[in-house]
Amino acid sequence: LVLCSDECPETTETSTFENPYVDRNSRWLTQVWERKSTTPQPHAANGYDVVGAHAWEAIVANMIKKTGISNGATVFDFGCGVGSSSLILCNLYSDITLFGVDYSEPLIKRAQTLLPHGTFWTQSIAEPLKQTPKQKFDLALCNGVFIYLNSEAEVEQSILNMASVLKPGAKMLLSDISDIKQKELADKVRNVVHTKIEKVSSDTSLDHLYLSREFFAKMAEKLNAKIEFIE
């Protein structure tokens, strides 16, 4: 887990990489999310069908509490899916102003149903925001999304997009990151999970994106932000 906190400034920076939007998994994944979007349990619809609902809720609630937000906060959920993380957040705190984006239209439609008070639209988190919210946000949330992006360049642009909507002193919660140093172990565990546990749909052909802690440390330095790594 990565918590980028305390001094994330407003920024209008863009990625220094050229053409970061090279398709790697998106066409195949679009079909996966379309199938999962109708799954009754929201956490399973967001791809966590190997985790029990109560365990998932406890994990996400613990992560959110570490951000220190409170009732009345403004939150932007990047890669929100059906809104499973935001549902837990809104159960923890009242009067949340919620925005969310995801590139899967079926997932966004489900999020709008589950969280009717939120503002949602369809787009990749690595693309420039299609809408500019009038307000700035206390928290940018991105849970389990980076593994599906195409490259470090897309992750960089996504983080810059998040920083652009934050208030001075606001926080980013970037969670469920695939650590490049743990790739061999992660692949072994994933092979067991995908062959021995029944899932809503299989993604055994998915090429996950693994990232280093050094990458995030450099991004924090670029944003003049503090960073905390949480196991």
Image (cartoon, rainbow, N blue to C red):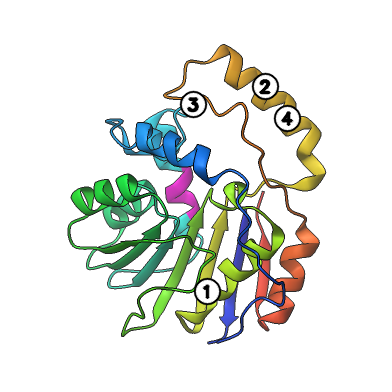
Q: Disc 2 designates what residue? A: 191
Up/down of 91 relative to 15, above or below: above
Q: In the depicted view, which residue is nearer to us: 84 or 133? A: 133
| Badge nearest the viewer, 1 or 3 | 1
The amino acid on which the numbered mark 3 sits, given as a three-letter code, is: Val
**Which amino acid is tagged 4?**
Asp
Residue type, mark 1 in image:
Asn
Question: Which disc number belongs to residue 210?
Answer: none
Query: The residue tagged with tag 3: helix, strand or loop?
Result: loop
Label located before the other in sequence (3 or 2): 3
Q: What stretch is highlighted in magenta?
A: 59-63
Please say if 80 is above or below 100: above
Q: Name the residue that disc number 4 marks.
A: 187
Q: Separation of disc 4 and disc 1 at Cα?
A: 30 Å
Residue for badge 3: 50
Q: Nearer the viewer, residue 150 or 215?
A: 150
Question: Overall secondary structure of the magenta stretch?
Answer: helix
Q: Residues within 10 Å of mark 3 (few under 14, many from 20)?
A: some
